[in-house]
Amino acid sequence: MSALKFPAHRAHEGTWTGTYRHIDLMGQEEELIQSHVVCEFPDDGKVFYRQTINLTHPDGSVIKAGFDGVDRGDHLWFDTPNFIGKSWETADGVILPNLQRKDEPCAHFVEVIIMGEGGTHRARTWHWFRGGQLFRRTLCDEVRQT
């Protein structure tokens, strides 16, 4: 693997903590979730990118998930039990995932991931669609821990 491939994705390597705020179309908060995300780039095997995530909901329940991305030339490809899709990056370092939900029929989301200057803060915004209609946004605010 070339260290030069997917530089914007690589810039997010490390551990991130923060919040995921689901909001409805009127801007009302539906749920505030605490997040712990680890982004890695394994040195061997077919996996180019690995993300492990723990989400703590207001009731104290924790969802643990993980997914791997495979290098497909100009994008990373994901195929998990919950979604399928790809991510790519712009020349300015913005990452753009587009993922079809397997666990929620006719639903998909498009995400925008932007790193703040200095690389210690990032913002992620998910735009959720079902049957072609926007129904939710998720605002993610995260701080790098390592």
Image (cartoon, rainbow, N blue to C red):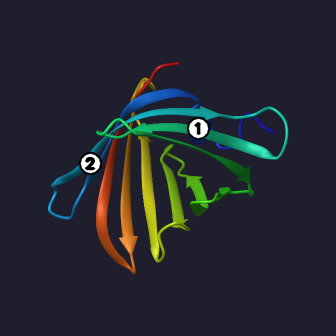
Image location of residue 99, percent across then percent down: 53, 63
Give left or right: position of 21 versus 43: left
Image location of residue 1, percent across then percent down: 81, 39
* Relative depth, front residue between 16 and 58: 58
Image location of residue 65, percent across then percent down: 56, 44
The amino acid marked with disc number 1 is Thr
Q: Which residue is mark 2?
A: 31
Residue drawn at x 66%, y 40% is 50
Q: Secondary structure at mark 1?
A: strand
Disc 1 crowd, CA 10 A, few/some/many (<14, 14-19, 20+)? some
Q: Earlier in the sequence, mark 1 or mark 2?
A: 2
- What label sits on residue 52 in the rendered view? 1
Task: Work out whether residue 67 can be spotted.
Answer: yes
Image location of residue 108, percent across then percent down: 46, 68
Based on the displayed image, in which of its 4 quarters is residue 121 positioned?
top left
Based on the displayed image, in which of its 4 quarters is residue 8 positioned?
top right
